[in-house]
């Protein structure tokens, strides 16, 4: 009952978001006229071991449209592989052409991304700081669509744009991720910014006013969600934020389940860390409305639904064996949960003309969302009880037609997924035997979700095994050929 109530609360939170979106949906933010005297803009490109995308990133950054004498580009590199060499080659090339571009390489990765951005900021010359992660491909007119907004509002501290998708059609997994991100940006971010409900920065595809960034305390590395950490402090300092749903910053989606797990674990952990760090400050921030404070706390704690899903699943078989049959009025809890699915569907309808076709990946998204519960729950547990928090990068593939071969270590969470899959299937059998069909839908969904996660894991492991065998077979031939050449 308690866990159902918790999940129902977040379902009602979805209905609240839907109502607020409906209220603010017609608000427009047209781009003001371009400034006659362009301010200085620094574009920061933080990268770490991204050999497949770093060159594309530099090319697109150089192609941004403001006057060359007003644009500075910082390639902020913590890499330990060929990324640094690739970046250095193109930085030197564009420097010869008169572009103000610099490579800032660190041999020690202290503070991870937040530490790299903090160390690079004193060398930035711009009044405004635009940030793009390695997998982004900003449009040439990005700055022309964002910078003018700052000129009309001195209190505006940050502008965030909507993430687009470079590879959403690659697989059901990337298609499912696209639906999830579209819902976050088109629905949740729209509501948070337009209703002033503690709007947040998403880490890339946005622009900061430098004075705001510094006034809010700069980049801090005590959480792995440095973006949410900084934007929360900025809002508490009474800076305003703007989300431009019509301005798209295309980015790459993780193509493997291990990469997606890394990303989601980081977001789950970082959000939980920010809740622990700022929960009291948000609660007592009386300059913000009670609705804004409630919305911020609910958003930061949203990943806790992963824990609730697992606990609810584990309760099913004991309840079935005790022949507990819940009253039909408890169906209201399920009705409350419809808020979140409606947000997913509406985001597709708002953004795309072919939204019905895109919703074919909705079932996959549901299975992946439930299947990620063990991975995300572990991250939340680590946020609460662990003191060391590594920033685990999400591997990118760039223009490769297949996922790049990266080190794939065994993760014991797979055993948890296997156990939950077996447990859920056992629950399905017990429910059928007891002729208690109430929990059957939930049990079957969990069984399919964890079975699907195991399938994705096994596919990735098999692909890596084949690649390793191919490399092992090719290496001796290359060695013999090299010997013949030397002779």
Image: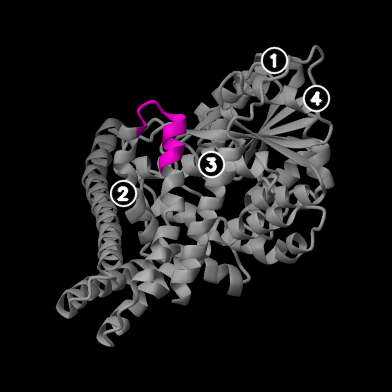
Disc 1: which residue: 98
Residue 486, image x, y percentages? 31, 33
Residue 422, image x, y percentages? 24, 72
At x 51%, y 52%, the residue is 14
Q: Which mark is residue 152?
A: 4
Disc 3: which residue: 187
User: Under tag 3, what secondary structure?
Assistant: helix
Residue 353 belongs to the span the image colors magenta: yes
Residues at discs 1 and 4 in contact (Cβ within 8 Å): no
Q: Upstream in the sequence, badge 1 or badge 2?
A: 1
In the image, residue 76 sits, relative to residue 229, either above or below, namely above
Residue found at the very far top of the displayed protein: 36
Disc 2: which residue: 364
Give how far apart the Cα atoms at labels 4 and 2 are: 43 Å
Quadrant in which the C terminus is drawn: top left
Q: Closer to us: mark 4 or mark 3?
A: 3
Give how far apart the Cα atoms at labels 1 and 2 are: 48 Å
Residues at discs 3 and 2 in contact (Cβ within 8 Å): no
- What is the quadrant of residue 24 in the picture? top right
Give how far apart the Cα atoms at labels 4 and 3 are: 25 Å
Q: Upstream in the sequence, badge 4 or badge 2?
A: 4
Q: Closer to us: mark 1 or mark 2?
A: 2
Q: Upstream in the sequence, badge 4 or badge 3?
A: 4
Residue 370, image x, y percentages? 37, 60
Disc 3: CA contacts within 10 A as few (<14), some (14-19) or many (>=20): many
Question: What is the chief secondary structure element of the magenta stretch?
Answer: helix
User: Under tag 2, what secondary structure?
Assistant: helix
């Amino acid at each position: 009952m308690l866990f159902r109530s918790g999940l129902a609360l977040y379902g009602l939170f979805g209905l609240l978001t839907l109502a607020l979106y409906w209220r603010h949906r017609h608000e427009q933010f047209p781009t003001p006229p371009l400034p006659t005297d362009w301010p200085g803009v620094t574009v920061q490109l933080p990268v770490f071991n991204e050999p497949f995308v770093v060159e594309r990133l530099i090319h697109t950054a150089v192609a941004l449209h403001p006057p060359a004498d007003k644009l500075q580009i910082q390639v902020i590199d913590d890499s330990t592989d060929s990324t640094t060499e690739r970046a250095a080659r193109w930085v030197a090339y564009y420097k010869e052409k008169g572009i103000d571009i610099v490579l800032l390489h660190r041999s020690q990765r202290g503070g991870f991304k937040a530490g790299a951005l903090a160390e690079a900021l004193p060398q930035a010359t711009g009044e405004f700081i635009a940030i793009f992660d390695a997998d982004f491909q900003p449009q040439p007119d990005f700055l022309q669509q964002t910078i003018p907004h700052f000129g009309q509002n001195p209190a505006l501290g940050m502008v965030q744009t909507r993430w687009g998708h470079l590879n959403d059609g690659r697989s059901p997994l990337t298609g499912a991720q696209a639906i999830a991100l579209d819902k976050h940006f088109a629905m949740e971010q729209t509501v948070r910014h337009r209703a002033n409900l503690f709007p947040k920065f998403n880490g890339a595809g946005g622009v900061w006013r430098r004075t705001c960034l510094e006034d809010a305390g700069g980049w801090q590395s005590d959480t792995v969600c440095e973006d949410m950490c900084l934007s929360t402090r900025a809002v508490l300092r009474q800076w305003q934020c703007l989300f431009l749903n019509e301005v798209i910053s295309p980015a790459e989606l993780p193509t493997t389940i291990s990469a997606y797990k890394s990303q989601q674990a980081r977001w789950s952990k970082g959000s939980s860390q920010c809740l622990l760090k700022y929960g009291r400050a948000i609660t007592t921030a009386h300059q913000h409305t009670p609705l804004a404070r409630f919305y911020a706390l609910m958003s930061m704690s949203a990943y806790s639904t992963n824990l609730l899903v697992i606990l609810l699943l584990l309760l099913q078989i004991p309840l079935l064996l005790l022949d507990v049959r819940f009253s039909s009025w408890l169906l209201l809890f399920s009705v409350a949960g419809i808020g979140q699915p409606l947000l997913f569907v509406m985001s597709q309808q708002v953004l795309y003309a072919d939204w019905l076709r895109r919703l074919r990946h909705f079932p996959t998204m549901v299975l992946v969302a439930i299947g990620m519960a063990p991975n995300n729950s572990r991250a939340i547990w680590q946020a609460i009880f662990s003191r060391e928090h590594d920033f685990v990068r999400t591997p990118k593939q760039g223009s490769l037609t297949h996922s790049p071969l990266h080190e794939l270590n065994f993760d014991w969470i797979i055993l948890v997924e296997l156990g939950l899959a077996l447990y859920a299937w056992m629950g399905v059998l017990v429910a059928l035997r007891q002729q208690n069909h109430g929990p059957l839908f939930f049990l079957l969904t969990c069984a399919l979700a964890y079975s699907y996660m195991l399938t994705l894991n096994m596919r990735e492991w098999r692909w890596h095994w084949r690649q390793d065998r191919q490399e092992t077979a090719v290496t001796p031939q290359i060695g013999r050929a090299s010997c013949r050449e030397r002779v």
